[in-house]
Image (cartoon, rainbow, N blue to C red):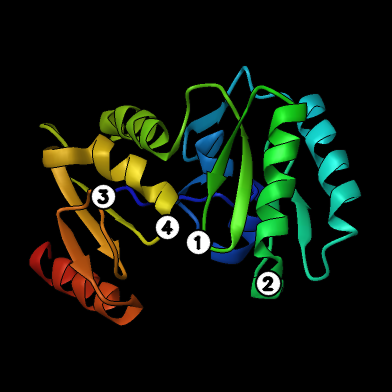
Amino acid sequence: MQVAVVSGRALGDLRARVRVSGVVYGGCHGLEIVGPGLRFRHPRARAAPVAAVRRRLVSGAHAIPGVRVEFKRLVVSLHYRAVVPSRHAAVRALAASVARAVPGFVVVPGRRVFDFVPRVRWDKGRAVCWIVGRARRALAPGPPVVLYVGDDTTDEAAFAAVGRGGITVHVGDGPTRAAHTVRGVREVHSLLRRLERATR
């Protein structure tokens, strides 16, 4: 069994938070991937244009109390969890203006965050397919069974990529492409314990 964690977080931040050996880590929506025998960085994702997005976001963020700009080398995040609701429109306007000024990026909305991701035709779904394709060589013969669990809008691409060939689980409420839904983290833990017992 191979475990992978794919996140919008920077690769270094993700590894520091999880801190489990033998796991495949995909940071910046899978633009960077490392794991046992695996190393990938998308060849078209470059730091210089990302830095330009960062400068514009930082310049505009001064006028919006509570907003935070996070630079992740290959992705820039505009966080507004601490921004009062009456200023959310200003955050959306800032994100839209920077997207127009610095082309070549996709603005990916998340939970009180806008991620500026290079427009390189890559997302969590493609990252998962890449990981599964490489990990297949180290697993038992036969087609692998993929279990993907996620709770963010950016996980929808992975749900679609895994499709009927695997098990997709959305955590939380709202519409989703996942085949199954659980209410929260506790139910995810319960699911994983049941799978562990079933595969012993």
Q: Earlier in the sequence, mark 4 or mark 1?
A: 1
Residue denoted by label 3: 1
Measure how far apart labels 3 and 4 are at the Cα level: 24 Å
Residue denoted by label 4: 152
Mark 3: which amino acid? Met
At horizontal 16% and vertical 60% (from top left) the residue drawn is: 180
At horizontal 70% and vertical 48% (from top left) the residue drawn is: 93
Instruction: Give how far across and how far down residue 183 sits, in percent.
Output: 26, 76
Residue 113 occupies quadrant: bottom right
Residue denoted by label 2: 86
Count the marks: how many? Answer: 4
Of residue 32 and residue 103, the one placed in the foreground of this image is: 103
Res 27 seen here: no
Q: Earlier in the sequence, mark 3 or mark 1?
A: 3
Mark 1: which amino acid? Val
As helix, strand or loop, the secondary structure at mark 2 comes to: helix
Measure how far apart labels 1 and 2 are at the Cα level: 41 Å
Measure how far apart labels 4 and 1 are at the Cα level: 22 Å
Measure how far apart labels 2 and 4 are at the Cα level: 24 Å
The crowd level at tag 1 (other Cα within 10 Å; few <14, some 14-19, many 20+) is few
Q: Is residue 157 above or below residue 170?
A: above
As helix, strand or loop, the secondary structure at mark 3 comes to: loop
Of residue 22 and residue 170, the one placed in the foreground of this image is: 170
| Res 20 label | 1
Measure how far apart labels 2 and 3 are at the Cα level: 47 Å
Q: Earlier in the sequence, mark 2 or mark 3?
A: 3
